[in-house]
């Protein structure tokens, strides 16, 4: 691991491995406990493949009671637990620890209930994101958040990462599309938050859980919102001579009061790589390409297409094609959807970043990236969820060249620092995990981070759940709880009062 | 001890107020404009921290869809500013003022988040929690912290901004807020179906919401309530209301589709433009139960799965005299009790009909003292909530007891 410090392994736990395996077998019978090195290899990393570690043991429970018992047992014995869904995290959120039980939720793969009058589905956390849509699409419904990994990633992992996708601009992130969860806590308690009703009661623990990266509890059931599929969708493929014009076009579309179903942008290197790979018919004489997709009823789309086209031309577009059929619309998307593998073809390895910036900072950030690219001697291609400012720079490198992975990582870190500097954030949808953990102080000061860790203390006071992720330095809850009362006296000398 | 009111004008003032409160172990009641002061368990503190002097919009970039303001900024001022740019807070925050006899148009942006306000558009656009992007706050530990940012897509660290939603000032004092804002619809039309019983209305609403007409408001006003919105526009019969918003050609198309879809349901009428807006404002603010003569009557706000709501109400009607209307396709039930609050009966019926929760919004002081205002939680959930409170406010100096702990 390139310089990444993980929590020190607990020798006592390592020494008790056989006993722990036996105890887990007592909770989950049959095939549910995996302990041989060969079989555990499949779990040694997630989507951030640069980092690998064999877990202490892998357990694949099938019932909520088993999850609860496993956590209770581990909690009582001070054993760490790393939850895992499908293992597609791009930030190393599901990276195992040598002394931790890897709790894999993939056997929770059933859809429990589909309720059309209330437009919700109740599913187990191991169901894939796309699996939900597949279960309801014949009836004209779908689940809106659509990460590119949707055929593989689990809805439990989506909740843990607050995942997004192309359609999140109009339809919201995971957090806006989940109404309830059931979760098991490190002490074995099983709790329900929210449900089919729209407002959860009490503190917004559901909001805290969403995006908490498996550090607070293990999600055992999810209630998601279903949406009716729009009548139709049409897309515009718009080429610009530079990123500035494309960026201004995006701003003008939104200023005109239009929130497209999707609005994606690619820069020159990404366009050329994608075109060479899938031959989507992308123009090659442009430096920026926008895909604007409008969905809804025909009357609305006809109206808005005209408005968007006018805005594009007003911003100096070189090309502007409007899809005349669903095949053509999908062809527009084909290049964008294949952007990652396309870049994979022109470089032995690539490293996908995930910062978000205020949209208007795009030209500045892209210029900064070009400069960094020269400085590091590594190429970079950009795909961009333009509507919501979420950048995915792909850094091209060759892991076989000694030192190049480290260089790519340093380049990536500099890009994220730049994102923060212009008012953005370290991660828009991939999570902090281990990858961006040590960059957290770029965005938060010690007080900010301490308060986040205190939330962790409310859920998992011994820091047993997924330690080593998100926080650069875990502080003990007792220490975090200490208070320094400032000596001050009423009446408030410097506060206006009446 | 006389109540002292402090009115900070900066976040530094808020911080030193909390420091002093901690030093003296003298809890603070946190208020904005005080429009929602009647909600929750009554708070009795020696000092009040009034945030209405902490004002100002600090950032508004319409083409970036983002607005930041200090916590005491009037919601009305923000809505006015947004309207000038044809934008809005899409979650349509309700105004609690009139329910308690206050003037309409009061309330702060901080209170909007603390109470997790929303409105009829909740069924499409969510609540304040779904639109908050970032905060600065002072915890009950006397520490200023921030969370989130100013961009929509952000998973950097725990979402403490959402943690503030619906926390009623019991975790931290939010001093600065950043919200996502959205374009306001150019046009709107409401389709009113007349004369439906509650159960037929629930069916019609489910049908409409399950269509691609993109309904952005679905409410049912039973006969007794229909006349008390929009200056009597709907008097005479029950009204089931479906709102369509968007660009004019789209609205026309979707309204005609909806009429087609529901033509067998009952007689219909279209209400457009300003009249439609007025109608939904009245529903949003619970105007039917704001009348002065009713102000002593207990009022519940119940949240359930939309299709369960009317069944629970039907069962409740057999137990107690109650007046009611529905928003959110039937999932938000406003219940005005003609006599006693009937908390135990109501809550057990909610449990029996699929679950959800009831909040006693308006009641006499003695009723609020005797009845848990917020839905009692299971033991393990209550413990978790209490631990969270302790992590933000270990000495319990912020609105102690407001949420029952
Ligand atoms: C090719 C590719 C494309 C991608 N595209 C996108 C994209 O467009 N948008 C996007 O947002 N992400 C994207 N991702 C990232 C990833 O798919 C998401 O983060 C996804 O939500 C992870 O789900 P998972 O089931 O694979 O979770 P894992 O990778 O198994 O775990 C992720 C995190 O969630 C925790 N976790 C998993 N299950 C649970 C549970 N049941 N309870 C508690 N914690 C749990 C883990 O501990 C870990 O911290 C992409 C990944 C790949 C490989």
Image (tube, coloured by chain):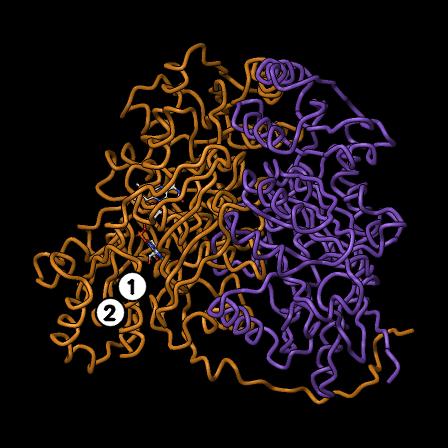
Q: Residues within 10 Å of mark 2 (few under 14, many from 20)?
A: many
Residue A82: mark in rendering = 1
Horizontally, residue B99 falls left or right of residue A396, namely right
C-beta proximity under 8 Å, tags 1 and 2: yes
Q: Secondary structure at mark 2?
A: strand
For label 2, being within 8 Å of ligand 1 is answered no
Relative image position of residue A38 (x, y in whole percent): 7, 58
For label 1, being within 8 Å of ligand 1 is answered yes
Quadrant of the rendered structure where residue A336 is? top left
From this viewpoint, which residue is outermost toward the top?
A324
The residue lying at 24 percent from left, 39 percent from top is A347
A317, above or below B224, in the image? above
In the picture, which quadrant includes the N terminus of chain A?
bottom left
**Frontmost residue, A284 versus A290:** A290
The residue lying at 41 percent from left, 56 percent from top is A182
Q: Residues within 10 Å of mark 1 (few under 14, many from 20)?
A: many
**Frontmost residue, B9 versus A252:** B9
- Label the purple chain with its letter: B
The disc numbered 1 marks a residue on which chain? A
The residue lying at 36 percent from left, 37 percent from top is A132
From this viewpoint, which residue is outermost toward the front?
B318
Chain A rendering hue: orange
Relative image position of residue A41 (x, y in whole percent): 13, 56
Residue A3: mark in rendering = none
Q: Is residue B250 visible?
A: yes
In the picture, which quadrant includes the C terminus of chain A?
bottom right
Residue topped by disc 2: A100
Q: Is residue A303 visible?
A: no
For marks 1 and 2 on the same chain, the one whose residue lies earlier in the sequence? 1
The residue lying at 31 percent from left, 55 percent from top is A407
């Amino acid at each position: 691991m390139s310089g990444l410090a993980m929590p020190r392994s607990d020798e006592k736990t390592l020494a008790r491995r056989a006993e722990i395996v036996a105890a887990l077998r007592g909770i989950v019978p049959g095939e549910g406990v995996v302990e041989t090195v060969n079989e555990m290899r499949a779990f040694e990393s997630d989507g951030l493949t640069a980092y690998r570690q064999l877990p202490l043991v892998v357990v694949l429970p099938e019932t909520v009671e088993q999850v609860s018992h496993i956590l209770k047992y581990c909690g009582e014995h001070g054993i760490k637990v790393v939850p895992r869904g499908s293992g597609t995290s791009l930030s190393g959120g599901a990276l195992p620890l040598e002394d931790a039980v890897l709790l894999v939720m993939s056997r929770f793969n059933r859809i429990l209930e589909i309720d059309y009058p209330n437009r919700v589905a109740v599913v187990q956390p191991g169901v894939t994101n796309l699996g939900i849509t597949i279960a309801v699409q014949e009836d004209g419904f779908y689940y809106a958040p659509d990460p590119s990994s949707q055929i593989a990633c689990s809805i439990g992992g989506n909740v843990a990462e607050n995942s997004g996708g192309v359609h999140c601009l109009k339809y919201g992130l995971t957090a806006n599309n989940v109404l309830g969860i059931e979760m098991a806590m490190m002490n074995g308690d099983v709790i329900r938050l929210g449900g089919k009703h729209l407002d959860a009661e009490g503190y917004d623990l559901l909001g805290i859980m969403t995006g908490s990266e498996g550090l607070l509890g293990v999600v055992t059931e999810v209630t998601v919102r279903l949406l009716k599929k729009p009548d139709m969708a049409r897309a515009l493929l718009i080429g610009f001579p530079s990123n500035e014009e494309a960026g201004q076009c995006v701003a003008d579309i939104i200023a005109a009061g239009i929130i497209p179903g999707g609005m994606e942008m690619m820069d020159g290197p990404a366009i050329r790589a994608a075109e060479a790979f899938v031959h989507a018919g992308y123009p090659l004489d442009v430096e920026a390409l926008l895909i604007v997709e409008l969905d809804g009823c025909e009357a609305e789309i006809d109206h808005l297409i005209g408005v968007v086209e006018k805005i594009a031309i007003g911003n100096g577009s070189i090309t502007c094609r409007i899809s005349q059929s669903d095949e053509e619309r999908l062809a527009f998307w084909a290049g964008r959807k294949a952007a990652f593998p396309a870049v994979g073809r022109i470089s032995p390895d690539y490293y996908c970043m995930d910062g978000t910036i205020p949209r208007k900072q795009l030209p500045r950030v892209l210029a900064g990236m070009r400069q960094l690219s020269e400085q590091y001697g590594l190429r970079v291609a950009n795909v961009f969820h333009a509507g919501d400012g979420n950048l995915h720079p792909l850094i091209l490198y060759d892991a076989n060249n000694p030192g190049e992975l480290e260089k790519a990582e340093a380049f990536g870190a500099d890009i994220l620092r730049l994102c923060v500097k212009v008012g953005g954030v370290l991660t828009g949808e991939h999570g902090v995990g281990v990858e961006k953990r040590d960059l957290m102080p770029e965005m938060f000061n010690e007080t900010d981070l301490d308060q986040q860790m205190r939330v962790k203390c409310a859920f998992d006071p011994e820091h047993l759940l997924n330690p080593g992720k998100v926080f650069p330095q875990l502080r003990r809850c007792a220490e975090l709880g200490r208070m320094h009362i400032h000596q001050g006296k009423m009446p408030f000398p410097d506060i206006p009062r009446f | 001890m006389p109540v002292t009111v402090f009115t900070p004008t900066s976040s530094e003032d808020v911080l030193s107020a909390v420091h002093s409160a901690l030093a003296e172990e003298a809890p603070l009641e946190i208020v904005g404009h005080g429009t929602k002061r009647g909600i929750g368990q009554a708070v009795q503190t020696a000092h009040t921290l009034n945030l209405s002097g902490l004002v100002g919009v600090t950032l508004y970039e319409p083409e970036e869809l983002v607005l930041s303001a200090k916590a005491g900024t009037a919601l009305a001022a923000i809505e006015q500013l947004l309207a000038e740019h044809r934008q809005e807070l899409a979650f349509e925050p309700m105004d609690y003022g009139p329910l308690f006899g206050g003037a309409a148009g009061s309330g702060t942006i901080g209170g909007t988040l603390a109470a997790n306000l929303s409105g009829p558009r909740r069924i499409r656009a969510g609540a304040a929690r779904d639109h908050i992007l970032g905060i600065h706050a002072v915890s009950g530990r006397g520490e200023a912290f921030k969370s989130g940012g100013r961009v929509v897509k952000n998973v950097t660290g725990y979402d403490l901004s959402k943690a503030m939603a619906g926390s009623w000032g019991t975790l931290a004092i939010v001093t600065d807020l950043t919200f996502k804002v959205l374009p306001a619809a150019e046009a709107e039309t409401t389709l009113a179906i007349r004369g439906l019983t509650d159960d037929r209305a629930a069916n019609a609403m489910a049908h409409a919401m399950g269509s691609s007409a993109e309904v952005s408001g679905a409410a049912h006003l039973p006969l007794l309530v229909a006349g008390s919105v929009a200056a009597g526009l709907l008097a005479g019969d029950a009204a089931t209301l479906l709102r369509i918003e968007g660009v004019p050609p789209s609205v026309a198309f979707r309204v005609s589709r909806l009429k087609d879809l529901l033509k067998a349901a009952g007689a219909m009428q279209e209400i457009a433009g300003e009249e439609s807006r007025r109608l939904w404002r009245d529903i949003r603010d619970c105007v039917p139960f704001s009348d002065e003569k009713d102000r002593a009557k207990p009022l519940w706000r119940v949240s359930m799965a939309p299709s369960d709501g009317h069944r629970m109400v039907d069962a409740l009607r057999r137990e107690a005299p109650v007046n009611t209307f529905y928003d959110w396709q039937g999932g938000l039930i406003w219940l005005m009790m003609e006599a006693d609050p009937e908390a135990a009966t109501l809550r057990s019926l909610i449990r029996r009909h699929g679950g959800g929760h009831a909040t006693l919004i308006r009641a006499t002081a003695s009723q609020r003292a005797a009845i848990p205002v917020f839905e009692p939680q299971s033991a393990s959930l209550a413990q978790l909530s209490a631990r969270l409170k302790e992590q933000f406010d270990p000495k319990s100096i912020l609105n102690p007891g407001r949420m029952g702990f």
